[in-house]
Amino acid sequence: MTSITGLVLTYNGERLLDEALASLSFCSEILLIDSGSSDATLDIAKKYNARVIHNDWNGAIEQHKFAVKQIKTPWVVTIDQDEIVSTELRDSIVKNLENPTNDIDGFYCPRKSWYFNRFILHSGWYPDKLFRIYKPEGISIGGIRPHEELRPITKAGELKGDIIHYPYENFNQHLEKINYYTQDAAEDLYSRGKRGSLGSAISHGIGKFLKQYILKQGFLDGRAGFIIAVHGFFYTFQKYIRLAELELKDKK
């Protein structure tokens, strides 16, 4: 099989990093791009003989662009520090990279996320197909902060098996991330000339709730689905109201 780098962007990721790196054991090399961890992240990396490169955080988009430049193998499998490659996905990766076709840049795979008391199968969260297996020269990195968007330059296939995702340890952590993400997203939108208002914050928030809970059948995810939809409203409301706040600050 061709050589593969398992890539993880890390910052204080000790909660699940051991399991994440163990799931990349089929890779030829594990590479961590760390932005200054002060917990056990680097000790866990040593356990797996990972190559660690420090790079100050400047957003997920720029961090991933930096990371791709450090790759020395023909293929990359990238996961977040709170994700695990399932056994089915691992087997699918190994099988497909034994004799990969030359005209393909990489592969999409589904991600299954745990929230509250279950894996979410609706709410717009699943199958959540992501371009996570790719050739370094075959990837386009873009998106709107705070999230990067990885896409193939020309052509991609699809693999069976899930990335298993445990995004939040508890509601407090979810709210902390909402606080950070919405501010970052508002600043990015403002720099692109977008503007917000109380009306747009309310209307976009309600639209997000209805989309997740009704159109994306979040009601089938039980209590977890309702909580996700409420948080979806709050996230979207916060993003647009902070966008309006930025405009007010500029007018002072």
Image: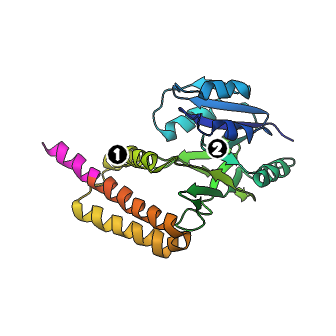
How far across and how far down the image is residue 69, in percent? 62, 32
Q: Amino acid at mark 2?
A: Ile
Quadrant of the frame with the N terminus: top right
- Quick one: label 1, few (<14), some, or many (20+) residues within 10 Å? many
Q: Which residue is mark 2?
A: 79
Q: Which residue is mark 1?
A: 183
Quadrant of the frame with the C terminus: top left
How far across and how far down the image is residue 194, in percent? 31, 54
Q: Secondary structure at mark 1?
A: helix
Which residues fall within the magenta stretch? 242-252
Q: Is residue 73 magenta?
A: no
How far across and how far down the image is residue 65, in percent? 56, 37
Q: Residue at x 46, y 67 (%)?
A: 226
Q: CA distance from mark 2 to mark 1?
A: 24 Å
Going from N to C along the chain, the mark reached first, 2 or 1, is 2
Q: Amino acid at mark 1?
A: Gln
